[in-house]
Image (cartoon, grey):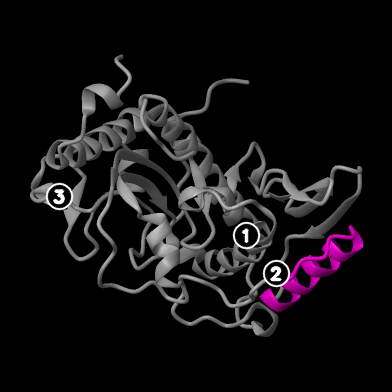
Amino acid sequence: MPPQSDAARWPALPYAAWRDTCETLHLWTQVIGKVKLRLAPLSNHWWGIVLFVTARGLTTGAMPYGDRVLQIDFDFCAHVLVLRTSDAREQRIALEPMATADFHAQVMAALRALEVEVSIWTTPVEIEVAIPFESDRQHASYDGAAAQTFWRQLVQADRVFNIFRARFLGKVSPVHFFWGSFDLAVTRFSGRAAPPLSGGRTPNVAAWVMQEAYSHECSSLGFWPGNGGYGRAAFYAYAYPEPEGFGAEKVAPQDAAYNGDVGQFLLDYDAVRASASPDEALLDFAQSTYEAAANRGGWDRKGLERQR
């Protein structure tokens, strides 16, 4: 097949055009994510409960259940949720417009059919107005074309984030999709413990949960599809704890800027896709914002970075 243009590989998806589907899909990923929360061993910074981008959508990866494993995949090409176990059993749920309550009920029924007994806390997290899954008939949208386009955006971001990740020798997270905040991220660590979190509040998330996430100094890069109050798809970068002068650092590309309201550097997704080289624009953003955190924070860059 002939190579795709950058515009085709990095598809446009205005948040306003798929907001309802985005909000519904966010909740559906939380249903699946909470299953993984119950089954997967606890890992530092909650890395063990995340989802991962695949060639067709998002996956939990293999989750232990007794002497079997369970894997749940969102397939945004065939628009189906697939639940598989290591004893060659399978259940499928069509991804189509339905209330979150019905999606939750179908997932639980599919798990029982696979003889996987699991109970989850059904209150959504990191959402201000949190309707328990089994009662939510408000969020019921599924635009298949939009969901597939969003996945194609994730494919590109995941690909570039992994290039950036490979340049670091220190402790670094996998590139992962977190269902709580509905974003793709990769995080580098200085190796030093961070001061306890103070101030702020994450809806329906206990303070100790956030403390586990931010127990060590970090520089994080991520992609939001438009949720979280931005109103448009954007790449973000922040440091915790934020070192003095971080927001005043000059970063690349020129469209990137520090937003004091959220304490993050932001770069519109559309600015990346419209650039002469989207890969290089995003890598420049990743590297320059990391350098802002590492230089201002006094990281041991020589010992932490792979020499290119």
Q: Quadrant of residue 106?
A: bottom right
**Labels 2 and 3: the sequence-earlier one:** 2
- Spatial distance from mark 2 to mark 1, Cα to Cα? 26 Å
Marks 2 and 3 close (CB-CB < 8 Å): no
SS of the residue at dot 3?
loop
- Quarter of the image that includes the C terminus: top left
Q: Which segment did they paint magenta? A: 100-119
SS of the residue at dot 1?
helix
At horizontal 29% and vertical 33% (from top left) the residue drawn is 281
Q: Quadrant of residue 280?
A: top left
Residue 307, position as x, y percentages in the image: 29, 15
Neighbour tally class for label 1: few under 14, some 14-19, many 20 plus, Cα within 10 Å: some
> Looking at the picture, does residue 29 appear above or below residue 68?
below
Q: Amino acid at mark 2?
A: Pro
Front-most of 23 and 278?
Answer: 23
Q: Which dot marks residue 97?
A: 2
In reply to whether residue 110 is colored magenta, the answer given is yes
For disc 3, the marked residue is 243
Residue 14, position as x, y percentages in the image: 43, 58
Neighbour tally class for label 2: few under 14, some 14-19, many 20 plus, Cα within 10 Å: some
> Looking at the picture, does residue 112 appear above or below residue 10?
below
Residue 285, position as x, y percentages in the image: 26, 37
At horizontal 73% and vertical 53% (from top left) the residue drawn is 79
Q: Main secondary structure of the magenta part?
A: helix
SS of the residue at dot 2?
loop
Q: Which dot marks residue 37?
A: 1
**Labels 2 and 1: the sequence-earlier one:** 1
Front-most of 276 and 200?
Answer: 200
- Spatial distance from mark 2 to mark 3, Cα to Cα? 45 Å
Front-most of 291 and 194?
Answer: 194
Left or right: 51 in relation to 45: right
At horizontal 48% and vertical 49% (from top left) the residue drawn is 44
